[in-house]
Image (tube, grey):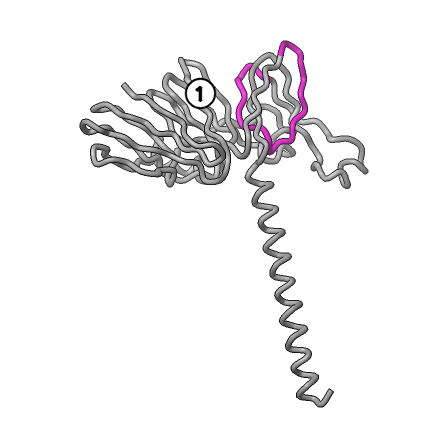
Amino acid sequence: MITHEIIGDDMQAVVLNLGAGDVVRAEAGALMFMTEAVEMDAKMEGGLLGGLKRKVLAGESLFITYFRGAGAGARLAFAGPYPGKIIHMPLAGQQMLCQRDAFLCATGNIDLSIAFTRRLGAGFFGGEGFILQKMEGTGDLFIHSGGTIVPVELHVGERLRVDTGCLVALEPTVDYDIARVGGIKTSLFGGEGLFFASLTGPGRIWLQTLPFSRLAERIHQAFRSDRDDVKRDFGGAFGKIGDLIGGE
């Protein structure tokens, strides 16, 4: 029997204890550590076509890594690629829709596939919501998100507008669509993009406070700013040296 423990606060990891023959599947590169009693193998789940769909459509790796308990003391851990939280979702035959880079690891018989959004408008304008991963089956699913997790329960007919990057997962009973942020001025200058994800209950959704796209954008902006500062400083220094050489 597989047991698990989620440890940490803002840089979480999930630690799993495996019995002999127990198997865990994980996204390539997510492993933190494993004991000698764990055997590892990489497989292209779904064959070449399945691997290419994961790589091209979902931005994931071609391979899924399999870990098998091979004796007493089989223990391993997985961690997310950036600061955030790990969500444990026990599945009992139902399905879950998740953002395309959310999968961390899973136990049991859970099928991983690609689910397109149901509306063409959502596909073209939903940003990160264009491609969703579908997790379906029986077992324990662990997904990773950025920042803090905000779970929301939507009642029948209740609607919530969400930044597309902040949507982590939703139950299939939740209707997903795209809505304009506002008028032209608001869309262009409001800083929130052109569209929101419009979610209508019933069902549960999970939101994240720090989408990776925002984090990456801020890092990129800081990098460009630092590089411009260096260029300006060096340009000024070399300019003064030139003035001295020229007798200025």
Percent position of residue 124, x then y? 63, 34
Question: Measured along the vertical axis of the image, is residue 75 above or below residue 244?
Answer: above
Percent position of residue 148, x then y? 55, 30
Splitting the image into 4 quarters, where does residue 179 fall?
top right
Which residue is located at x 38 percent, y 21 percent? Answer: 140
Q: Three-letter amino acid code at disc 1? A: Met
Percent position of residue 102, x then y? 48, 32
Give the camera-side residue of 223 and 201.
Answer: 223
Give the camera-side residue of 246 and 168.
Answer: 246
Q: Is residue 37 visible?
A: yes
Splitting the image into 4 quarters, where does residue 240 fall?
bottom right
Q: What kind of element bears circle 1? A: strand
Range covered by the magenta-colored residues: 155-174
Percent position of residue 44, x then y? 33, 36
Read off the residue under disc 1: 89
The stretch drawn in magenta includes residue 48: no
